[in-house]
Amino acid sequence: MKRILLATVATLFAAAAVAEYPDKPITIVVPFAAGGPTDKVARDLAEALRKPLGGQSIIIENVGGAGGTLGAAKVSKASNDGYTLLLHHIGMSTSPALYRKMAYDTLGDFEYLGMINEVPMTLIGKPTLPANTYPELVKWLEANKGKINLANAGLGAASHLCGLLLQSTLKIDMQTVPYKGTGPAMTDLLGGQVDLMCDQTTNTSTQIEAGKVKAYAVTSAKRLTTPALKNLPTLDEAGLKGFNVSIWHGMYAPKGTPKAVTDKINAALRVALKDAEFVKREEALGAVVVTDARLAGAEHKKFVEAEINKWGPVIKAAGQYAD
Ligand code: ASP
């Protein structure tokens, strides 16, 4: 009898906690370093989420390393009460093919909250790199084989995927330099410590516009309309036929987070993604905010599954693994 009573009280407490959600600050884990593009979207989104989440504070925690898998692993094991969330990108779908051992199951260990945006990438170089155009870059790469450094955010990061495809399509090996995120990688590129990087336009367009880095191409299938990027060729038209890499971001909660909570977060996400200031910032940086069915957690999950199936064979063909 006492046991039944205790169980009933516990259920009532849990129901009350769900009804009051959120009644304390929420942490969004960004699996990359501060100052990079994933961090940027998380901080802008946090501002837009605040109001629809009842004015609660949202804390961004950067857990960079191992191409985003450390931060994702942390959230997969966090308490499933809706107060620890993950904002990740395409790395959710590329890491299963890249890592022989994963600390979490991408499709099984999370509740999918919805997709945020799609972002093309750009191929950029250090300011002192002598090549000014993509054809000049290819000549420079041919002449400097064995000496080229390519920055990325670790195996499984978007910058890694793009660099991997670039190397295998050009058939030129480069020395990769992994960082905890492309925020710190950009600092080193600007300082000339590394030669090249592929990164989201949300991190590169400001530097390209200011003429602080060399910009060679965009990775999307079509040219972009963003003023700072519209003169850049696509890699496809520059000679790498079929090259098309577009990054996306989504939000996730630990498996078992109550549906009433994930529904509240999804509703808040839908409001935030219509926030005029958020949309304006994203568009100015070349990102497209999601407005289609992938706003729903279940649809986003189907999309991630399709991405796993799309990238897995490409990565395996390029022969890249990490333990
Ligand atoms: N853009 C990075 C990547 O290459 C990650 C980041 O710092 O946001 O995946």
Image (cartoon, rainbow, N blue to C red):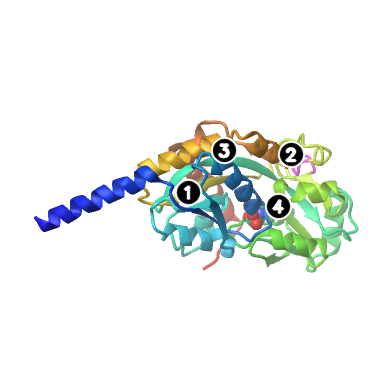
Viewer-side label of 4, 3: 3
Name the spot of residue 196 as percent of width and height, x first.
77, 59
Mark 1 neighbour class, 10 Å CA radius: few under 14, some 14 to 19, many 20 or more: many
Residue type, mark 3 in image: Ala
Q: Earlier in the sequence, mark 1 or mark 3?
A: 1
Residue found at x 69% / y 57%: 35
**Label 2 crowd bin: few (<14), some (14–19), many (20+), radius 10 Å:** some
User: Which residue is denoted by mark 1 in the rendering?
Assistant: 252
Q: Tally the numbered discs.
A: 4
Q: CA distance from mark 3 to mark 2?
A: 17 Å
Residue at the disc numbered 2: 284
* 1 or 3: mark nearer the eye: 3
Task: State the mark number for residue 199.
Answer: 4
Mark positioned earlier in the residue sequence (1 or 2):
1
Labels 3, 2: front one:
3
Q: Amino acid at mark 2?
A: Ala
- On the question of residue 320 being in view, the answer is no
Q: Establish if 48 lies above or below 292.
A: below
Q: Earlier in the sequence, mark 4 or mark 3?
A: 4
Q: CA distance from mark 1 to mark 3?
A: 16 Å
The amino acid type, in three-letter code, at marker 4 is Asp
Q: CA distance from mark 4 to mark 2?
A: 16 Å
Marked residue nearer the N-terminal end (1 or 4): 4
User: Mark 4 vs ligand 1: CB under 8 Å?
Assistant: yes
- Mark 1 to mark 2 CA distance (whole Å): 26 Å
Instruction: Tell me the quarter of the image containing the N terminus.
Output: bottom left
